[in-house]
Image: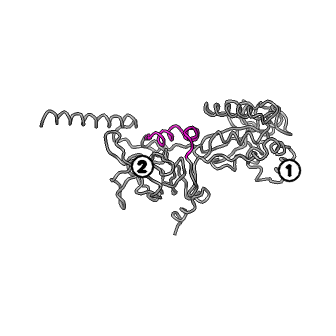
């Protein structure tokens, strides 16, 4: 063997060892380690006070991407406050709602727009007929990003000069939230006559109609889309607002998430996987299999035309990269070491996907795929 060939083999060997060492370091695992399912939830919290919490639930509950809205108390230091104590002003708590939302489907910025259209932001002594600090409006932020967006939104509202008075709604660091008694939850559904009578008498709707007019019913920008809809890719700025840092890195910067430490690698539920940006259908749980790689793996796409392949020569190895057709999101790579019937492995990043369970396909606009999961 010549010296040149020997040197080349040494360099290649060192490169392979370095790459293996990097993977071991990146995953923090040792050979033979039995991985545990460390599923991550993307559901986030947003907390708003706007007077009577009965009236603050409906505007948020009707939004796509909102999982649930809980009425409760926050802002004070008294543990486990009761409605009677809060309503009498015996605590420092305010009536509030806590919104559980999926940032992949609706942004915090959009939630703020719905909030402003539900209150009187110029009143710091209560809201409408309910007077006292226990009915004061407020935005309770859970992190620095929410704090920044809330302040920007408040400033924009003030600069719009929609209101003749100063915008006084405070932005406060979130504190312990205590769910209200069960009979208060979804009160507008449980006691519709009582609720409608109260709401009309409070003057809330009359104020909102006068202040916002035709702009009262805010329509959030869709973060994702359903099958058949036209799609226009959001600007880079919008994508950064709506995607998590990892989702943006993977889909827009061709990143790769860590194996075994991602949302769907071990997901066994029935349903389909859609593009996190566009919502275009990509894969089905019926074609998903356990590949042992730590990433979601499929034998074939659900809709072939929604996936585009191209050559990828990064890391000095030629691979086949997979991207979504409409959103042009980086999804992962295609390999020829999969099981029958195709012999292919579509190795995909969870961060590029959103899972739609079989029981929610119709509600989310993917009705054409319901029959795939119907029991014979």
* Residue that badge 1 annotates: 197
Distance Cα–Cα, label 1 vs label 2: 56 Å
Question: Camera-side residue: 13 or 249?
Answer: 249
**Can I make out residue 175 in this image?**
no
In the visual, does 75 lie left or right of 252?
right
Residue farthest left in this picture: 1
Question: Camera-side residue: 173 or 60?
Answer: 60
Q: Nearer the viewer, mark 1 or mark 2?
A: 2
Residue drawn at point x = 62 percent, y = 57 percent: 363
Residue drawn at point x = 77 percent, y = 49 percent: 187
Q: Is residue 341 above or below residue 240?
A: below
Give coordinates of residue 154: x percent, y percent.
71, 33
In the visual, does 297 lie left or right of 159?
left
Q: Quadrant of the N terminus?
A: top left
Magenta segment, which residues?
233-257
* Residue that badge 2 annotates: 322
Q: Element under label 1?
A: helix
Q: Main secondary structure of the magenta part?
A: helix
Q: Element under label 2?
A: strand
Residue 260, magenta (yes or no): no
Give coordinates of residue 141: x percent, y percent.
66, 33
First-in-chain label (1 vs 2): 1
Query: How is the model colour-coded?
Result: one colour
Question: Camera-side residue: 312 or 297?
Answer: 312
């Amino acid at each position: 063997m010549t010296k040149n060939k020997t040197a080349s083999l040494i360099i290649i060997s060192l490169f392979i060892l370095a790459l293996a060492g990097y993977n071991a370091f990146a995953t923090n695992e040792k050979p033979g380690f039995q991985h545990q399912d460390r599923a991550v939830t993307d559901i986030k919290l947003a907390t708003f006070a706007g007077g009577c919490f009965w009236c603050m639930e409906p505007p948020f509950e009707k939004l796509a991407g909102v999982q649930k809205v809980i009425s409760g108390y926050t802002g004070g230091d008294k543990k486990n406050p009761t409605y009677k104590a809060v309503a009498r002003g015996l605590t420092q708590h305010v009536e509030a709602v806590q919104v559980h939302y999926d940032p992949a489907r609706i942004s915090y910025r959009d939630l703020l727009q719905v909030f402003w259209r539900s209150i009187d932001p110029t009143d710091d002594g209560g809201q409408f007929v309910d007077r006292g600090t226990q009915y004061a409006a407020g935005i309770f932020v859970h992190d620095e990003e929410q704090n920044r967006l809330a302040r920007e939104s408040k400033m924009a509202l003030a600069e719009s000069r929609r209101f003749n008075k100063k915008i006084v709604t405070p932005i406060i660091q979130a504190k312990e939230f205590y769910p209200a008694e069960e009979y208060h939850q979804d009160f507008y559904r449980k006691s519709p006559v009582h609720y409608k009578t109260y709401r009309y008498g409070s003057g809330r709707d009359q104020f909102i109609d006068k202040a916002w007019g035709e702009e009262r019913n805010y329509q959030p920008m869709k973060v994702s889309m359903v099958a058949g809809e036209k799609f226009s890719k959001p600007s880079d700025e919008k994508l950064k607002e709506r995607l998590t840092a990892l989702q943006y890195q993977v889909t827009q910067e061709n990143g790769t998430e860590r194996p075994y430490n991602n949302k769907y690698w071990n997901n066994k539920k029935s349903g389909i996987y859609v593009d996190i940006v566009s919502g275009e259908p990509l894969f089905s749980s019926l074609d998903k299999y356990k590949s042992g790689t730590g990433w979601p793996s499929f034998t074939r796409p659900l809709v072939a035309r929604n996936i585009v392949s191209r050559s990828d020569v990064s890391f000095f190895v030629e691979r086949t990269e997979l991207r979504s057709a409409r959103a042009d999101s980086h999804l992962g790579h295609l390999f020829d070491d999969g099981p029958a019937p195709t012999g292919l492995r579509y190795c995909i990043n969870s961060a590029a996907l959103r899972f739609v369970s079989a029981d929610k396909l119709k509600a989310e606009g993917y009705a054409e795929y319901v029959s795939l999961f119907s029991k014979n």
